[in-house]
Amino acid sequence: MKFFIVVLIISACAGCQVVNTSRQSTMPLESQGLSCLEIKNSSPESQSGYYVVDLDGQKPLPPIRIYCDMVTEGGGWMLFAHHTDGLDSLTTTKNVTTNKFGVISKQHWVAMRDSMTNGMLFVDEKERVSRISSAKLFGANCEPVSNINNLTDLSKNGSRYIWHHENRGCDVRGLDYSLITLIDSSTSKSYREAGAALYQSGSMKFDVWPYGNETSSYKHQNTLFYFIK
C-alpha cells in the first residue's frame, strides 16, 4: 500500500500543475476544467496529480481540488472515494486524497455521477485495476448508481452498495449478484460484505477484472481507490 501511494505522488509531481492540498487558502480556486477528462483532452501530456475542477460549470458548486489519474485506462479519471475494510464510519472530506481515507461530498458526488459518460475505475493496494461501464452502472436492476445521492448515507437509504445488480431478486442471498461496496463496519451484514470490495457473481460483469476466476475481490484486497469518468 505504501509503495502505491508513493508512486501516485511522484507521478503527480512530474511536470503537471500540482495543486497544494496541505494549505487552506481564502482565495477562490481557479478552475482548470470541468473534469479530469476535459483537462486530459485539452492537454494530452497532463500527468496524474491534483487539479482544480468545476464539476457543474457556472452553476452554484464551487471548484474543488480533485486527484486525476491521467494514465490508467486512457486517463481522465476523477478520484471520489478512498476506502478500506473495517472503518467505523465513512467520512466526507473536502478533498479526497491518495493518502487519507474519505469520500467526496454529496453535492460534488451527484455532479460527478450525473456527468459520467465512461464508467468507474477501481485500483487496489496492489495496483490491480478493475473497470465497469456507465451503461452497466446506470442499468442495474436493484441499485443503479443513479439511486445513490450520498456516499456517507448508504445504510440510511436502505442500501449498502454504490451499485447492485442481481439475476433473481435483490436480497444478496444466492450467488447471482454483482456489487460495488462502500461499507463501514456498522452496516456490514456478513463476512462476505467487505468494506471496500467488488463482486461479479451475477450476469452483469466488470469490463476489466484482474482477479482471475474469482467472483469477488475481497479475498485479495482490503483497500480501493474509487474513480469515475
Image (spheres, grey):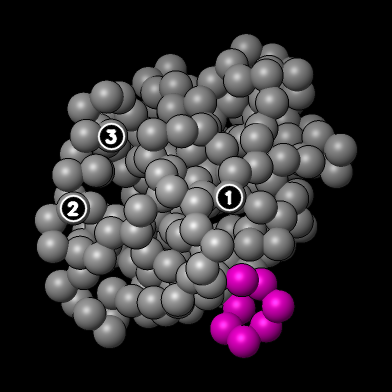
Q: What is the magenta range?
A: 56-62
The percent coordinates of residue 113 (x first, y second) are: 61, 65
Residue at which label 1 appears: 94
Looking at the image, is mark 1 or mark 3 earlier in the sequence?
A: 3
Q: Is residue 73 visible?
A: no
Separation of marks 1 and 3 at Cα, in angstroms: 19 Å
Question: Badge 2: few (under 14), some or many (20 or more) residues near its Cα, within 10 Å?
Answer: some
Q: Is residue 56 visible?
A: yes
Q: Amino acid at mark 3?
A: Ile
Q: Amino acid at mark 2?
A: Cys
Q: Quadrant of residue 76?
A: bottom left
The correct choice, above or below, for 215 with respect to 9 in the image is above
Separation of marks 1 and 2 at Cα, in angstroms: 21 Å
Looking at the image, is mark 1 or mark 2 earlier in the sequence?
A: 2
The correct choice, above or below, for 23 with respect to 155 in the image is below
Left or right position of 59 against 96: right
Question: Badge 1: few (under 14), some or many (20 or more) residues near its Cα, within 10 Å?
Answer: some
Within the magenta stretch, is there residue 61?
yes
Which dot marks residue 13? 2
